[in-house]
Amino acid sequence: MTLIDGKKLSKKIEDSIALEVDNLKPKGVVPGLAVIIVGDDPASHTYVSMKEKSCKRVGYYSIVHKMPDTITQNEIIETIEMMNNNPRIDGILVQLPLPEHIDTTKILEVIDPKKDVDGFHPYNMGRVVENLEAYAPCTPAGVIEMFKEYNISLEGKDVCVVGASNIVGKPMAALLLNENATVTITHIYTKDLSSHTKKADIIIVGVGVPNLIKEDMVKDGAIVIDIGINRLESGKLVGDVDFENVSKKSSYITPVPGGVGPMTIAMLLQNTLTAAKSRES
Ligand code: GUN
């Protein structure tokens, strides 16, 4: 069994981004990221502060707009429009989920697609599906980077994606299809989850259910990618996979923490760098 080390790979990507930032400086370009966070969900605040710290590490300009959950939709839209028009800002990220009174689709559609470094705007999502140049959502893009780093070919592989969210499962399936994998997407209405996972060469799960994927659901030698991040009552962070038992059967597996999580941030930095470089032209 080989552990896929997302922490190490993300550090390698961050280091090469930091070098590129140095090279951009003489041209007067400092990549800039604006983050909008609404409400006081502790997990969201943790993610945002991790993103902020990563920006600092690689030398980006970053600003965080913290808004109370009493904020109106229009006030959020005004802030996004301000960022759309701010030449120092290359990327805009609205941390999800948003409070219930806010229409998430409307908010995401206000972001200038050229600054949509999270890849959640329908314009970028559509281009990802069509295998065109686009900002791909960071978590699935990070998973693809892991496969590349470990020389795992996706062509013709049977991949089972567990979870069909707009931010993980659906774009993950599109990116896999673009790599010529045979993709099955399962979700809460799937009749018999293990009948699909058992057949898969690769299982990618991101639904937020601890221990959902157990050893009897995985074939020998499968590759298992765990996107879940769950905090147990004990305070321990775990994924969606019963790591201890599934790792014994798998050929490659990602740990939680230290697997996909750091890759999400690395891809955010990568997308923001791409946006900043396109500013030059
Ligand atoms: N909420 C959970 N994951 C993400 C992410 O990758 N980006 C944003 N903006 N919100 C999230």
Image (cartoon, rainbow, N blue to C red):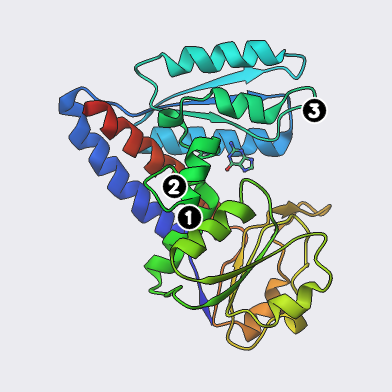
Question: Looking at numbered disc 3 in the image, what kind of residue is underneath it?
Answer: Glu
- Mark 3: secondary structure: loop
Q: Is residue 173 visible?
A: yes
Other-residue count near label 3 (Cα within 10 Å), few / some / many at <14 / 14–19 / ≥20: few
Circle nearer the N terminus (1, 2): 1
Question: From the viewer's perspective, is residue 127 above or below residue 158?
Answer: above
Q: Which residue is mark 3?
A: 100
Residue 229 on image: x %, y %: 68, 54
Q: Nearer the viewer, mark 3 or mark 1?
A: 3
Asked which secondary structure carries label 2, the reply is helix
Q: Amino acid under label 1?
A: Gly
Q: What x and y, as percent, mark residue 43?
A: 69, 39
Q: Are marks 1 and 2 in contact (CB under 8 Å)?
A: yes
Residue beneath the point at 62% across and 19% down: 66
Residue indicated by mark 2: 267
**Quadrant of the rendered structure where residue 120 is?**
top right
Quadrant of ligand 1 in image:
top right
* Closer to the camera in the image, 106 or 44: 106
Left/right placement of residue 109 relative to residue 27 reads right
Q: Nearer the viewer, mark 2 or mark 3?
A: 3
Which residue: 45% across, 69% down?
A: 180
Q: What number of labels is visible?
A: 3
Q: Is residue 218 above or below residue 18?
A: below
Q: Which residue is mark 1?
A: 142
